[in-house]
Image (cartoon, helix red, strand yellow):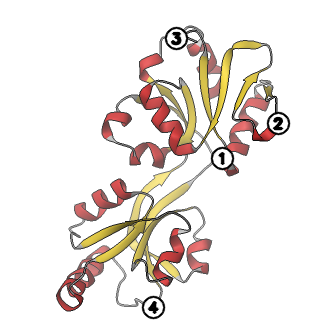
C-alpha cells in the first residue's frame, strides 16, 4: 500500500463531473468495476494509482491525515477545516470551476438591515427584547463564527444545517443563514438576499496535496501532469 498513490475525487455532483473531465483531457482513463456507483477505481495502465470517490469534505480530512496523497475539493472546505488540518495540506492549483462565495443572507422583509453593522444592532435588539440570540443556520460554523466576530457581531448562535440551509429562516429554525452561493438564484428564490458586505469567502475547486506524502515516488510527475 505504501507505494500506492491515492487520489480523492468528489463522489457526486457538478464537482465530480468537472474533475473527471481533467482526467479525460490528460488521456487518463478511469476504470471502476461497478460503474458510477463504485467508490474505488483505478487508472488504466497505471497500476500504482488508486482512485477514491469521497464526499468533498472527507477529501480534506483524508488529505490532512495522509491517507490521500492528492485530492480535488473546494477551497471553502479547506478553510472551514481545523487549523491543524489546513497546515498539513498544500494548494497545488486553483481550478477554473466550482466558483462560489460563502455569504451571509437575510430574509428580504428585513428592509432595515443592509450591512453587518445593521445586523449587530438587530442582534442586540433580539437579546434585549426577545431574551434570545439571533440564530444563524450554516454548514460552515468555523468560517461564519470567525467572520461575524471579526465584524463585531457577537450576539448570535449557530444552528448546524443538515439540509437545504436556505429553508431554515422560513421554517422558524433560524433568523438568517450563511451559505455557499454561485449565482444567488437559490437565495433569491427563497426570498433571501446577501448583505452588502456579507461575503465571507470566495471559493473555487482546487487540487490539493498532502504535505506528509509529498515525496512519494511518482507523485511529482503525476501532480505536474494533472495541474498543467
Let me know if residue 68 appears in the view: yes
Report how far apart the C-alphas of labels 2 and 1 lie in the structure: 18 Å
Is 121 left or right of 113, judged from the image as shown?
left
Which residue is labeled 4 in the image?
A: 109
In the image, what residue occupies the spot 43% across and 28% down? Answer: 65
In the image, what residue occupies the spot 40% across and 77% down? Answer: 174
Report how far apart the C-alphas of labels 1 and 4 lie in the structure: 34 Å
Label 1 CA crowd tier, 10 Å (few <14, some 14–19, many 20+): some
Image coords of residue 184 (percent x, y):
57, 70
Is 99 left or right of 85, judged from the image as shown?
right
Mark 2 vs 1, N-terminal side = 1
Image coords of residue 66 (percent x, y):
46, 24
Image coords of residue 110 (percent x, y):
40, 89
Report how far apart the C-alphas of labels 2 and 4 lie in the structure: 47 Å
Which residue is labeled 2 in the image?
A: 35
Which residue is labeled 1 in the image?
A: 15
In the image, what residue occupies the spot 69% across and 51% down? Answer: 14
Q: Is residue 50 above or below residue 54?
A: above
SS under mark 2: helix
Direction left: furthest residue: 128
Report how far apart the C-alphas of labels 2 and 3 lie in the structure: 29 Å
Amino acid at each position: 500500500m505504501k507505494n500506492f498513490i491515492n487520489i480523492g475525487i468528489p463522489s457526486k455532483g457538478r464537482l465530480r463531473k468537472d474533475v473527471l473531465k481533467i482526467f479525460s483531457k490528460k488521456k487518463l482513463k478511469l476504470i471502476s468495476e461497478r460503474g458510477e456507483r463504485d467508490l474505488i477505481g483505478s487508472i488504466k495502465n497505471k497500476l500504482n494509482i488508486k482512485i477514491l470517490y469521497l464526499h468533498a469534505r472527507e477529501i480534506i480530512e483524508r488529505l490532512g491525515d495522509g491517507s490521500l496523497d492528492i485530492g480535488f475539493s473546494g477551497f471553502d472546505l479547506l478553510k472551514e477545516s481545523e487549523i491543524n488540518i489546513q497546515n498539513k495540506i498544500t494548494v497545488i492549483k486553483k481550478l477554473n470551476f466550482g466558483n462560489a462565495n460563502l455569504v451571509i443572507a437575510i430574509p428580504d422583509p428585513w428592509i432595515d438591515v443592509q450591512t453587518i453593522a445593521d445586523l449587530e444592532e438587530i442582534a442586540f435588539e433580539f437579546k434585549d427584547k426577545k431574551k434570545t440570540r439571533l440564530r444563524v443556520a450554516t454548514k460552515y460554523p468555523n468560517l461564519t463564527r470567525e467572520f461575524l466576530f471579526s465584524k463585531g457581531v457577537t450576539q448570535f448562535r449557530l444552528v448546524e444545517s443538515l439540509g437545504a440551509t436556505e429553508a431554515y429562516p422560513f421554517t422558524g429554525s433560524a433568523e438568517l443563514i450563511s451559505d455557499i452561493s454561485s449565482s444567488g438564484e437559490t437565495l433569491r428564490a427563497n426570498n433571501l438576499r446577501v448583505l452588502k458586505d456579507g461575503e465571507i469567502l470566495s471559493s473555487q475547486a482546487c487540487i490539493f496535496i498532502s504535505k506528509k506524502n509529498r515525496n512519494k515516488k511518482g507523485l511529482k510527475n503525476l501532480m505536474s501532469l494533472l495541474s498543467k
